[in-house]
Amino acid sequence: MNWLISANDKLYDHVSAFNKWGYIDWKQNRTKYQVDDIVYIYCTRPYKKVMYKTIVNKINIPFSAATDDEEFWKDKAEYEKSKQGLYVRLKLEQQVNTERLSLVLLQQQGLKNAPQASMKINVQLANYMDRYFNDFYSEGFFTDLPANTDLGIREGLAKSIQVNKYERSSVARAKCIEYWGCKCNVCGIDFEEIYGERGKGFIHIHHIIPLHQINKEYIVNYKSDLIPVCPNCHAMLHREADNYTLSVKELKKILLDHRNRH
């Protein structure tokens, strides 16, 4: 069975919860979930798109046996209300941020309205969403760099296609931009200020530690592991000299020193 539910980022930090545990214990209410059901999560404003695909891992969990997630509740009153009833464990399968899963396009595929409560969805809509549940379809925040560089919450799983490809979370990228903004953290360029609407939201995301150096799955912290930079500064951060690459702080100092001399 395929289900669609909604998540309000103003009430609960779903990204951080999924990053910490890889699952969320969700209020089950009266929904008749079964283990191995697929549950897609629609994120309300400002996203208004489906961003998570999960699988039901456990059902009928009492609050006393559920994972205590108080730290992720932004509205503590809602947390207190949640201490009743049964929970379902939703294990994170995939996460993505793409306009192809926006409410407008989902409505073109037969979805009548934005989900409020849990709702069953048909196979056709589920198949449409599955088509875009990978980061090849994430957009709006970066352009591709050569394969031996990294773009940058759980990331880093190597896939064998023709070469090893490291999965990158576009949700983590979106949260990084939400936290840091779209200005380059080295040179300060804001593409919207220069190019207007065409440049809005455009920026590269740099992994402080490149994924190819980590070489394993890890939980990315979008506040400390990722940083927005422009394409030029991104290239400079990856350019090696004497087997050494610069940190963001080092590159920023070089830029400031050069500007002061001229």
Image: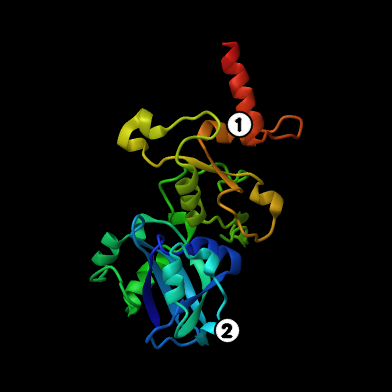
Q: Nearer the viewer, mark 2 or mark 1?
A: 2
Q: Which residue is painted at 46% across and 85% down in the image? A: 86
Mark 2 belongs to which amino acid?
Answer: Ala
Label 2 packing within 10 angstroms: few (<14), some (14-19), many (20+) = few
Considering only vertical position in the picture, is 256 above or below 43? above
Secondary structure of residue under mark 1: helix
Residue 133: name its quadrant. bottom left
Q: Is residue 30 left or right of residue 80?
A: left
* Residue where numbered disc 2 is placed: 65
Q: Residue 166 in the image: x percent, y percent?
A: 60, 56
Q: Which mark is residue 97?
A: none
Q: Which residue is painted at 37% across and 87% down in the image? A: 30
Q: Residue 51 in the image: x percent, y percent?
A: 42, 63
Q: Residue 198 in the image: x percent, y percent?
A: 33, 37
Label 1 packing within 10 angstroms: few (<14), some (14-19), many (20+) = some
| Quadrant occupied by the C terminus | top right
- Which of these two is toward me, 81 or 22? 81
- Which of these two is toward me, 236 or 145? 236
Q: Earlier in the sequence, mark 2 or mark 1?
A: 2
Residue 97: name its quadrant. bottom left
Residue extending furthest toward the right: 242
| Quadrant occupied by the N terminus | bottom left
- Which of these two is toward me, 164 or 22? 22
Q: CA distance from mark 2 to mark 1?
A: 50 Å
Mark 1 belongs to which amino acid?
Answer: Met
> Do the residues under discs 2 and 1 have CB atoms within 8 angstroms?
no
Q: Which residue is painted at 44% across and 77% down in the image? A: 82
Q: Residue 165 in the image: x percent, y percent?
A: 60, 55
Q: Which residue is painted at 70% across and 55% down in the image? A: 215
* Residue where numbered disc 1 is placed: 236
Q: Is residue 252 left or right of residue 242?
A: left
